[in-house]
Each structure stands twice: as C-alpha cells, then as structure tokens.
Amino acid sequence: MGSENVSLYERLSARGVSRRDFMKFCGATAATLGLSSTFVPTIAAKIAGAVESGLTPALWINGGACTGCTESIAQAAYTNVADIVLDFLSLNGMETISMATGEYAEQAIEATYEAASERPYILLYEGAVMTGLGGNVLRVAGVPQTDHLDHLAPKAAVVIAMGSCAVDGGWVIAHPNPAGGMGVQEYLKKKGIDTPVVNLPGCPVNPEELVAVVVQALLLGSDGDLQSGVKAVKDSLDSQNRPGYLYNATIHDSCPRRGHFENGEFVYKFGTEAEAKNWCLYPVGCKGPQTYRLCPMLRWNDSQSWCVDSGGPCIGCASFNWVDNNAPFRGRFRQVGIGLTEGGLNPASTAAAIGGVAAVALVAHGFGMKAAGRIGPNATLKNEPMKEHDAKRLKKQGGAK
C-alpha cells in the first residue's frame, strides 16, 4: 500500500498507538498552546489532514552541540513525539541518527532543497553556529558547517532553533568562546538571510515544545499551506522570537516548592532535614524566579519528572547566555544580562519592570550593582560576605563550621 493512501490512524495503529493515545496527545498539545479542550477535535483533524494530504518535509541539521536535544526528542518515553510528530513530518535528513550516511545522506538533503519551490520544508537546527576559523572549527561533508546553513536556510519556510545552543550559542559561547559560537538568529541576521526563526531555548529542548510549534503551524495555517501556518506562528512570537505561550511565566510561578518560598522555608545546605522536606532551593542556586519556561507543567519522559523534582535547583538553562550569567550554578543568582550581550538587564526582567514600581526598583538596583563593579562579565561575587540571616539559617541547618 502506498504511503499516500495510509491514514494517520493506520500509521499510529501499526506502531501500537491507539486513537485514545492520540486524542490524549491532542489534549496535551491544546493545553500547551493555551487552548481549551474544545480545540482537541480541531487539532486532531488538522494533524490527520496534514498527514493524508502529504507529509511536510523537514531537515534536521547540527551545529556545535552535544546532541542533547536529539536525545531529548528521540528517547521521549511517551509515544507522541516519535510516533505522532514524525508521522506528519517527512524527516528527509537528520545527521545524527539517519540511516543514510555519507554522500547518500547529503543527496537526501539536497533533493529536499531542490524541491522547496513545490514543497517548502522546515529546517530544524540543533547546536551553536560555529564561526571560528572561517567556519572551519566544525566541518561537515568536507566543508564548513556554516556553508550548509547558508545554503539551506534561505529556502526554508521557517528555521526552528532547538535548544539554547541554537538560540544564542548556549554553553558553547561560555567565556572566552574560542570557537566563535553564536545563535542561529544572530548568524542569519549578519548574513542578511531573512527566513523566520523560532527560538526554543532550554538545555535540552523539551519534546512538547517542538510539538507545539509544529502543531501550531498546522492548526493556524490554511489546509496544505505551510507558509500561512508559519506566518501565524511568527505573529505569536515574543520580542525574543520565542512562542509566547511557552515562555510567558517563570518556573517559580508554578514550582511545587513555591509554598515553602512564601513561608520562608529554604534549603541552605544539601543533606539536611530541610532538603529532605523538599523546601525551596533558592539559596543553593535555584534560578527559577528569573527563568521563563514551563518546565513544572511540561516536565520530561511522559511527565515523570524535571530538575527540581529530581532534587536539583533550576540552573536557568532557558535564559540567555545562561552559563556565564548563571554560574556558579549552586550559588544564589546575582548576574544580570541583556538579550544576547553581556552585562546589562535581563530582557524578561525588563519586561516585568513595566508592570510595577517594585520591579523597576529591582532593575535600578541591578544598575547600581553594575556601576559598583559587583556584576558584569569580569565580576564575581563568590567571595561576597553572606547575609546575616542566611548565615544564621545555614548554621541552624548544620552547614557552618
């Protein structure tokens, strides 16, 4: 039977995914998109129609990366990513796990590129763009990897930058960034390539985040018209080119430990009774109050767990320049950064400042700290004296010698 005659439900059934599982997936996607349950049948119909009218071509290419985003997608426990999303995306090229290798893999990618005028494709990009040594820091198929991005991005309907490395360089750009890593959006702008970019920061990207963007394009676009769907997605992006519905609240807002924060119950040292009671991890480095992402709700591996549930503090991996700005990861947050540069205001904090005088005061305090040389790319507060009330609590928890 030709693949064009196989319905979505037949495809899913062949992989052991029931209609019930599929509708559960559609319900979860509706919730992620901020839609009511009344949209579930519409989402299901759109996805089924997209599959039956012809799969949307997609290319997945890598820059400088640990392939953590690939692992996050490929090893998701719940079947929705591997068995549903990839059923309406024709993944014609994926360098890390493709069965085709060498010239055959490159031929598959080039064939998709050549057919772009008839079948526009989605370009999924993982990892930092490595510009060092004229792009020769990272070579693929005998040429600088940047050449592949220069070639493929102009004809793509949209570029989805998956994970913090693709968004702004992630851990690759940590000082002194010898490989010249940068994010896709910044690189394409410098090259004069105006293909829309959707940023999905996080280390790694959550499968549900990628699913939401692809489904949104199908849901909001005209039948069979990827370009109109991409326009709808683009219209919903925030000032940092992130989907607003995925990055409109801090991790702290929905953290299950927030009640302890409100009650002043904190962990000051690991291995104490306070940690056993799951008290708030802010004093030991949690960046949840400054990090915009929906981790407490989306979670990982069929919603089994996430960083704070596993006992570790949020290290702010979805914030910009997160390694330089948030280190030391087990230290209380003090760095203030702006956009893709070092040493200014965090864009999320700037936006929050519009909401009230209290937030403005915090921002002004940040400026004062910077002026005093207490923060910035060359500053460190590792040796700053501990506040008296923190010292008393740490001593009470058995952390002081």
Image (spheres, rainbow, N blue to C red):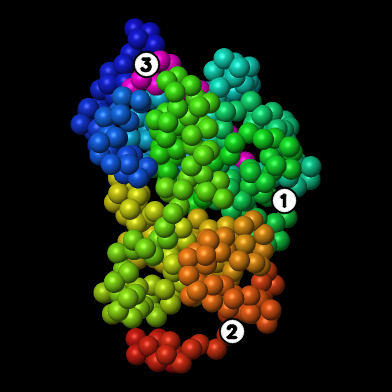
The one nearer the camera, 369 or 231, is 231
Looking at numbered disc 1 in the image, what kind of residue is underneath it?
Answer: Gly
The single residue placed furthest to the right in the displayed view is 134
Image quadrant assignment for residue 174: bottom right
Foreground mark, 1 or 3, reads 3
> In percent of the image, x 51 and y 44: which residue is there?
237
Where is residue 81? Give x, y as percent.
Answer: 37, 35
The single residue placed furthest to the left in the displayed view is 20
Asked if disc 1 and disc 3 are in contact, CB closer than 8 Å, the reply is no
The residue identified by callout 1 is 180
Query: In the picture provided, is 78 more to the left or to the right than 292?
Result: left
Between the residue at mark 1 and the residue at mark 2, the CA separation in whole angstroms equals 30 Å
> In percent of the image, x 65 and y 67: which residue is there?
344
Upstream in the sequence, badge 1 or badge 2?
Answer: 1
Asked whether 337 falls inside the magenta stretch, the response is no
Query: In the picture provided, is 76 more to the left or to the right than 23?
Result: right
> In percent of the image, x 36 and y 20: which residue is there?
49
Instruction: Work out whether residue 120 can be spotted.
Output: yes
Image quadrant assignment for residue 82: top left
The residue identified by callout 2 is 383
The residue identified by callout 3 is 52
Which region is colored magenta?
48-63
Q: Determine crowd level at label 1: few under 14, some 14-19, many 20+ residues with C-alpha closer than 10 A.
A: some
Q: Is residue 292 above or below residue 283?
A: above
Where is residue 1? Give x, y as percent.
Answer: 34, 7
Q: Secondary structure at mark 3?
A: helix
